[in-house]
Image (tube, rainbow, N blue to C red):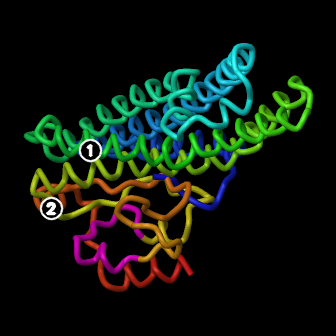
Amino acid sequence: MFYGHHHSYSEKPDADKEAIDDLTRQAKDQTGVMATLTRARVEQLKAEIQAERAFSKGLDRSQKQILKTINAALEISSPSALLNLSPPEFSSLLLNGGLGEAIDGYIDQQNRIMKSIDKVMGATAPEFQMNSIEAQSAAIQTQNVSAIFDDLIVPDISAAVKAGLTDIMLFVPVEVAMSNMATKMKSSRGGQLNAIKTKISQYGRSLTAVAAEAAGLDNYLFTGPRDGITRKFCRALVDLVVDEKQMSKLDNGQGLSVKTSCGGYNCRHSWSPVSEGFIRAVTMVKKAKPRDIAKANAGAR
């Protein structure tokens, strides 16, 4: 659900504010259910931004705690003994040493995102209840946590810690090795946070897709900002409704699923499931035509 181009994490806060401001202006110009939907999307966007920022702070605290844990472990054990821990034992050391707190914090933020999606669904399918997809949402949450921590954060931190422990075995002073460990962790943060931002957005869209299927909705309204940094792919689709068949023909040019990534990396546009009644009732909403799909795909090239 982001708009335009590839922004680094350091650039993103201003871009986030611009997206929120643009959507807020849209809501003020709208009436009825469309205004309700746009306001719900603003809340979802804010929830995702809060999740990203809270995760960044939580990860920073966790990494500092891990350094303290490793330092304390070296007072009662040797670097070689720590390096000889099995993969599960080493992961447990990191989790108990501070990373577990970051995971718990991220799960709390996921729950906030889920509540915001409940409001989105309430705008277009008032009879739908999120608890009807409890099992699916739990599976999506687990997969998302695994993709972020098991596949990204834990390997990066493990590599930094093991490199530091190896340095100590090679007689590098402990304080120097610990400083190098901290530097390696910090150097990987930018890439981690950009990847995590995408995963957070994909989490929300995946929940939305599952909710849409459960609600029997197969039309999707493309919602989001229309500002100066909106991708051409996204600009061609804003306020248009596509069905599942048209969705399958869309290509954002980045090798990512359009249903869960919209315009691609750092995209803050959204698919809002809508009914035929919604489409008929909201005059500003139109169904996409083949030329609209072609225009979006051309913009992605």
Tell me if residue 155 comes above or below residue 247 in the rendering: above
Q: Is residue 285 magenta?
A: no
Q: How many marks?
A: 2
- Please name the residue that numbered disc 2 is placed on: 280
Q: Give the structural element (helix, strand or loop) at label 2.
A: helix
Tags 2 and 1 in contact by the CB under 8 Å rule?
no
Rendered position, 182 above or below 293: above
Mark 1: few/some/many CA within 10 Å (<14, 14-19, 20+) = few
Q: Which mark is residue 65?
A: none
Quadrant of the rendered image containing residue 218: bottom left
The residue shown at (85%, 31%) is 177
User: What residue type is disc 2 on?
Assistant: Arg
- The x and y percentages for residue 214 are 12, 51
Q: Label 1, on which residue? A: 139
| Dot 2 or dot 1, earlier in sequence | 1
x, y percent for residue 146: 42, 44
State how far apart marks 2 and 1 are (Cα).
Answer: 35 Å
Q: Residue at x 91, y 33 (%)?
A: 172
Quadrant location of residue 43? top left
Residue type for callout 1: Ala
Q: Is residue 272 left or right of residue 71?
A: left
Give residue 131's quadrant in the image: top left
Query: Residue visible at 76% across and 41% down?
Result: 163
**Span colored in magenta:** 237-250
Say if 79 sits above or below 76 in the image.
Answer: below
Is residue 241 located in the magenta-colored stretch of the structure?
yes
The front one of 152 and 203 is 152
Residue 240 locus on image (x, y percent) = 33, 66
Disc 2: CA contacts within 10 A as few (<14), some (14-19) or many (>=20): few
Viewer-side residue, 284 vs 81: 81
**Residue for point 62% across, 59% down:** 229
| Element marked by disc 1 | helix
